[in-house]
Image (spheres, helix red, strand yellow):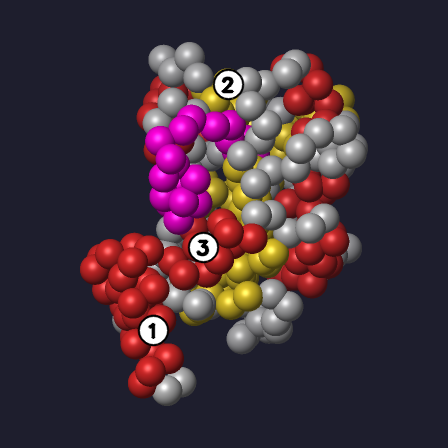
Amino acid sequence: MSITKKTKTALRILEAKGLRGVYNTIQAKFDHSYRPDETDLVFQLLTGAEKAGVMIDVGAHHGSSLAPFAQHGWQVIAFEPDSTNRAALSEAFSAYDNVIIDPRACADQPQPAATLFTSPESTGVSGLSAFLESHAASEQVVVTTLAEALKEYGRLSHPVDFLKIDTEGFDWMVLKGFPWETGPQPQVILCEFDDAKTVPLGYDFHDLAGYLAAHGYQLIISEWHPIRHYGDTHRWQRFATYPCTLANPKGWGNILAVRDQALFTRMCEHCGLR
């Protein structure tokens, strides 16, 4: 990249994000300890107009992702089927009248009872598949689809602005259960890819990314180095726009899917991609 182009890029980042944004972009490129918070990135971009919206959090865990949105007055529907995780989630957010905590799991087909697997390695790997040797059957949970759940809740105060999914391998199934044909599509979707979890379930990174692209989204890939051990601090690798191949075939990470061109451009600038 030429000096002129680098200067123009730095000026665009400075205008969009200020000096802190320039620092973060440089840090992302040269500091191996840098770890972006993809949910916070979405929060910063979607709350710039000081407007409360609607967030759906599938796999809410203890609520760290939804917290800034709830505190900002957004309407939040949080799905968390793990009863232990849900207890912590309820303790933190039961007093919020703008947060609904739903005990069901989500997929592409409803089920009256499905086995939830948990592991002592991490509270964050609860899910409907046992991809670790340490996974063990924990409890029976009800499975719904987002189409069914949103119909039950009735008309929301606003179309879904942000759909965040982290279901330890079932992210594509959750997406396929969204009511794509009956209402506005989310402005931004954040979901996880990890072939180590999903190939045994019948899909890979490109299947998931291609599905989102086919629904009119432009994608930013936040790739992380292969997981050494759950519960450890993970190492981040890079941002890239899709289509792309993974820098490491065993890498995992998050897909930021954006419908609006202007918002996608701003997100690329925040990620140092423009």
How far apart marks 3 and 2 lie (CA) works out to: 28 Å
As drawn, which residue projects farthest toward the bottom?
Answer: 2
Which of these two is toward me, 212 or 142?
212
Tell me if mark 3 has few (under 14), some (14-19) or many (20+) residues whose alpha carbon lies within 10 angstroms of its own: many
Q: Residue at x 71, y 34 (%)?
A: 178
How far apart marks 1 and 2 lie (CA) works out to: 44 Å
Q: Quadrant of residue 198?
A: bottom right
> In terms of secondary structure, where does tag 1 sit?
helix
Q: Which mark is residue 267?
A: 3
Q: Residue at x 36, y 39 (%)?
A: 48
The reply to whether discs 1 and 2 touch (Cβ–Cβ < 8 Å) is no
Region rendered in magenta:
39-59
Which of these two is toward me, 190 or 267?
267
Q: Amino acid at mark 1?
A: Lys
Tell me if residue 154 comes above or below residue 170 in the rendering. Answer: above
Q: Residue at x 67, y 22 (%)?
A: 149
Residue 63 in sight: no
Q: Which mark is residue 8?
A: 1
Q: Quadrant of residue 110?
A: top right
Q: Amino acid at mark 3?
A: Met
Which of these two is toward me, 120 or 32?
32
The reply to whether discs 3 and 2 touch (Cβ–Cβ < 8 Å) is no
Task: Identify the residue under disc 2.
Answer: 100
Q: Quadrant of residue 183?
A: top right
**Precedes in sequence: disc 1 or disc 3:** 1
Tell me if mark 1 has few (under 14), some (14-19) or many (20+) residues whose alpha carbon lies within 10 angstroms of its own: few
